[in-house]
Image (cartoon, helix red, strand yellow):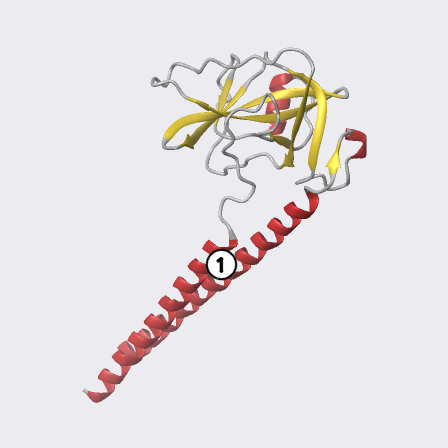
Amino acid sequence: MLRTVAFIVFSIAVVSLLLKLSWWQLSRADEKKQLQSQIRDRQHSMIVDLVQLPAEPLWHSVTLEGEFDNQHPILLDNQLYRGRSGYHLYLPFISQQQRILVNVGWIAAPPYREILPILPQFKGRTVIHGVIAPAQKLLQFKPDSTQQQWPLRVQNIELEWLSQRLQQPLLPWVIQISASSPTALIQTWQPVVMGPKKHYGYAIQWFLLAIAVGVISLLWLRREREE
């Protein structure tokens, strides 16, 4: 009897957990749908003056004129493109007396870790087009704060830490440059890494697992009663 009660409690707990995971994936899918809709709506409005920035600037399209700071490049590590390892090259962009970090695009990594890639130099004033986006945040990584020389090779874009290294304030977001910009490198960045369809797929998987565990538990209980 005790074994049966324990099995029932365990089965209920497992089914509840699986249903909770399925519901969580559905909520994540809804969040991704709302984010995609927000991105589409906001990218229709073009900002050409930093003074015109709305209270929530994320995902708005922007066109700015200014100059790149080639002396302080930042290499975001572990960026793959067509199976090849590389970096996302970030450069401070000076426009209207403010500094904005710009993701110029992907650049291939040399075959040896201790060698850094040869970086392009962007001279003079230029116009960039792009999208205002949040800085990439990966909780399991931290920037290599022991590195003293530029370019900095980092595992994460932490704007506050980078501002301290630059000894200049950076705006609290980055610009993901558009492929139409003359200075753009290979573009691999995506605003939404996992779309809502994948979350729906995971939700269905968790739900089917919950059903399978429930059915197996009922069959086991039925066999116990017959014995």
Quadrant housing residue 214: bottom left
**Which residue, as the protein is rendered here, is positioned at the far left?**
227
Which of the image's four quarters has the N terminus?
bottom left
Indicate whether 126 appears above or below 207: above
Which residue does the image show at 53% across and 55% down from the upper left?
28
Residue 63 vs 197, above or below: the answer is: above
Residue shown at 69% from the left, 14% from the top:
125
- Farthest bottom residue? 226
Q: Is residue 18 left or right of residue 217?
A: right
Q: Quadrant of residue 227?
A: bottom left
* Callout 1 amino acid: Gln
Residue with the mark numbered 1: 25
Closer to the camera, 112 or 179?
179
In the foreground, 191 or 113: 191
Q: Position of residue 48 (x, y in %)?
A: 76, 30
Q: Secondary structure at mark 1?
A: helix
Q: Position of residue 138 (x, y in %)?
A: 50, 37
Residue 1 makes an appearance in the image:
no
**Image position of 152 (left or right of 82):** right
Decide: few, some or many residues near mark 1? Use Cα within 10 Å; few <14, some 14-19, many ≥20: many
